[in-house]
Amino acid sequence: MAPTNVGGLGLVAEDVHIGRQAPEPLTLEGIRTRRAKAGKLDAPDRVLLGHPESAARKPCVLKQAAKHLKKPGLVSLGGGLPSSDNFPFESLSMQVPTPANKFSQHADRLKEVTIGKHDVRDGVGEGVLDLSIALNYGQSIGSAQLLRWVTEHTELVHDPAIADWRCALTIGSTGSLEAAYRMFGDRARGDGILTEEYSFSTALETAAPLGLRVFGVPMDEQGLLPEKMDELLSNWDEEARGGARRPRVL
């Protein structure tokens, strides 16, 4: 049975002999169609779990003012953006493995990629990033081009189960954990977090100075056991746990 993509769903046909075939590559339109049929759910209100520090944060005034930069005739002195003509690099070249060559590392099968200083301005290729953009100041959320790619990759490959999701760029996993702990945990409330019984040491070490208690959930070779987590939370005793509230963060 030949794979089908009826309605742009991005899903292949069911074969009675071999079972479900591998998914076809999805398109953004295909994902929207599938999501509409599946009926994605909105996530619960996360503000209720937030730390007072998170609630106290307000939008950056300078970043909000950026919407006026496109006003004709406006000369902005706020951004401090250096002229790309002064950047000491005209182009960068690199050799990269490609899917067509099965990501081979052999030198004769690598593809050479070059990025120039003003490729976007000069209409060189179809890229949306060049050195004049990459080496200059960007948005507070990080590279818009990279964030777009990460978001598209997440939607195409991982298919989040909720509708109101977004991606965020961070400096690494430990930085992400520290930010999440500060947003959702508060030592003054006796907050704690759940994790696997044998967990990533840095995750535990990051929680300690923030005053967050860590409670392990039994696991097997497949990971955390849901029934054990349910049992732990259903029978939670704050007094027996030293005043720690029932965790709301896993």
Image (cartoon, grey):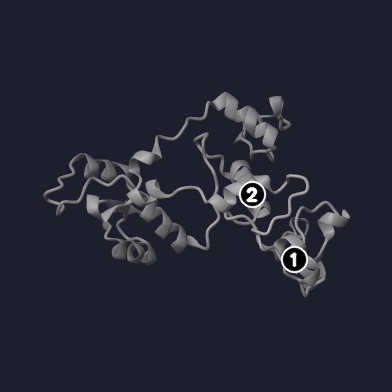
* Amino acid residing under circle 1: Val
The residue at the point 64 percent across, 56 percent down is 143
The residue at the point 86 percent across, 54 percent down is 125
Which element carries disc 2, helix, strand or loop?
A: helix
Residue 19's tag is none
Q: In this view, does 232 lie above or below 42?
A: below
The residue at the point 56 percent across, 39 percent down is 159
11 displayed left or right of 167: right
Tell me whether the residue at label 1 lies in contact with that at label 2, contact meaning CB atoms closer than 8 angstroms.
no
Front in this rendered view, residue 128 or 70:
70
- Rendering coords of residue 244 (x, y %): 20, 51
Front in this rendered view, residue 250 or 17:
250
Quarter residue 178 falls in: bottom left
Is disc 1 surrounded by few (<14), some (14 to 19) or many (20+) residues within 10 Å?
Answer: some
Disc nearest the viewer among 1 and 2: 2
Residue 66's tag is 2
- Rendering coords of residue 152 (x, y %): 64, 45
* Amino acid residing under circle 2: Ala
Q: Residue furthest left?
A: 239
Residue where numbered disc 1 is placed = 96
